[in-house]
Image: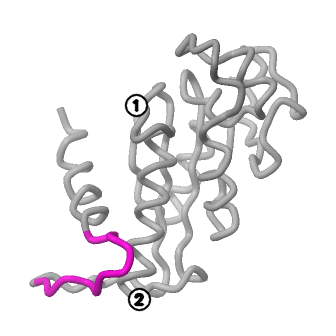
Amino acid sequence: MMKLPMVLPLLALTACATPGLPPPSTDVELRHTEDARAVFQASGDRWRDGVGAALFYADKVTQAYERLGVPLEAQHIVLVFHGDAAYHLLNDAAFARYDQRADPTQTQNPNAAVIQRLAERGVRVEICASTMEQRGWERDDLLPEVIVTPNAFPRIIDLQMDGYAHLDFD
C-alpha cells in the first residue's frame, strides 16, 4: 500500500508543529519556502482529536510551515472533500441531521472552528458538487467558508498539474 510512505513525512512535519517551541535542529533543509503547494483529498469519514482528519492535519501543516519560517502568503493549501468526508463541511443544522456517528447530543459541527481558522490562514476548503447532489445538500447547508467545486477528481487533477503535492485522507 502506497499511502503509508506519503503519510510518514506529513507526520514528521506535524511533530515539528508544537506551538511555542523553536524549530528543532534538523539534517534536512526545507527547500520550498516561497511557494509551498498541497492538495488534501478527503473522502473517508476519518477523525482525529475530535475533528476530521484532513482538517486536523491541514491545521498542523500550516502551523508547522509558519514555525519553519514559511509565511502564510507562500502556503497554497487546498482541501477537497467528497464522498463520506463531505459532511464534515456542513453547517450546524445540516450536520446534526446528517452526522453518521449517531451522537444525539452533538448539535454543532465540531469542524467549524478549524475550518474558520484554516480559511483565515488562506487555506481553501472545497466540497464536490456531485457529492452534494448525491446527498441532497444545498449551498445553504454548508459552512460559510466552504467553496463548491464542480467535481473533486478533475479539481484534484488540475491542482496536481499546477504543481500541488497530493495528500490522500481516505
Q: Is residue 25 magenta?
A: yes
Q: Quadrant of residue 12?
A: bottom left
Picture residue at 90% right of the left edge, 33% below the top: 140
Picture residue at 13% right of the left edge, 83% below the top: 26
x%, y% of residue 147?
Answer: 76, 48
x%, y% of residue 137?
Answer: 81, 22
Picture residue at 45% right of the left edge, 80% below the top: 66
N-terminal of the pair, mark 1 or mark 2, is 2
Left or right, residue 43 beside residue 99: left
Closer-to-camera residue (163/50): 50
Q: Quadrant of residue 64?
A: bottom left
Residue type (three-letter) at the residue carrying disc 1: Asp
Picture residue at 27% right of the left edge, 71% below the top: 16
Q: Quadrant of the N terminus?
A: top left
44 is higher (above) or lower (below) than 22? above
Residue type (three-letter) at the residue carrying disc 2: Gly
Closer mark to the observer between disc 1 and disc 2: 2
x%, y% of residue 157?
Answer: 53, 47
x%, y% of residue 52?
Answer: 50, 38
Q: Residues within 10 Å of mark 1 (few under 14, many from 20)?
A: some
- The answer for how far apart the CA atoms under marks 1 and 2 are is 30 Å
Instruction: Please identify the dominant SS of the magenta region.
Output: loop
Q: Which residue is mark 2?
A: 69
Q: Residues within 10 Å of mark 2 (few under 14, many from 20)?
A: few
Circles 1 and 2, Cβ within 8 Å, touching? The answer is: no
> Which residues are drawn in magenta?
16-26
Residue sticking out furthest to the right: 140
Q: Which residue is mark 1?
A: 170
Badge 2 element: loop
Residue sticking out furthest to the left: 27
Q: Quadrant of the C terminus?
A: top left
